[in-house]
Amino acid sequence: MLGEGFEEVYHLKGGILKYLEEVPQDQSKWQGDCFVFDNRVTVRHDLSEGDYDQCHACRHPVSVEDRASEHYSPGISCPHCWDSLSEKTRRSAIDRQKQIELAKARNQPHPIGFNYRKAEV
């Protein structure tokens, strides 16, 4: 950031999640959801699971509005990628989604589509 010309650059000790955990929402400068690298996809200021999902084909966050699109197919495509996926990627996504659904039906974990945090409770 300094290299790009910003003069006031700060580091959040403990990271964004620690900031959201410790700073009361009415005093926070944070707006919106925070992207996290687990099956929650995003979290709100109170660290509860956010409203976003993730497209497993293109890895793009998918909003509630995106999921209402005719171009959204869970685990397979979203409005951001439906018209740009190669046939190989689309087939792979379809196969992966079948495996996710089979694992859910068997009440078994699957690396994608399984929330390990909820399973620990």
Image (cartoon, helix red, strand yellow):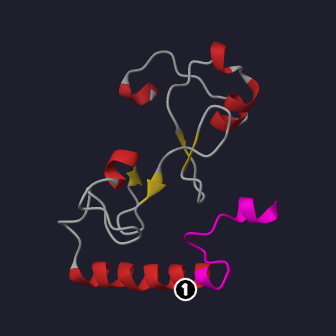
For residue 86, side relative to residue 118 (left or right): left
Report x, y in % for residue 88.
Answer: 27, 84
User: The magenta stretch spans which residues?
Assistant: 105-121
Residue 34 versus residue 8 in the image, above or below: below
Q: Secondary structure at mark 1?
A: helix
For the question of whether residue 13 can be seen, the reply is no
The residue lying at 42 percent from left, 67 percent from top is 56
Magenta includes 106? yes
Magenta includes 86? no
Quadrant containing the N terminus in the rendered view: top left
Say which residue label 1 marks.
102
Q: Quadrant of residue 84?
A: bottom left
Report x, y in % for residue 55.
Answer: 40, 62
- Residue count near mark 1 (Cα–Cα under 10 Å), binned few <14, some 14–19, many ≥20: some
For residue 94, side relative to residue 25 (left or right): left
Q: Quadrant of residue 60?
A: bottom left
Near-viewer residue (112 or 5):
112
Report x, y in % for residue 112.
Answer: 55, 71
Residue 121 versus residue 2 in the image, above or below: below
Residue 118 versus residue 29 in the image, above or below: below
The residue lying at 42 percent from left, 20 percent from top is 6
Q: Amino acid at mark 1?
A: Leu
Near-viewer residue (60 or 74):
74
Predominant secondary structure, magenta span: loop
Q: Quadrant of residue 40?
A: bottom right
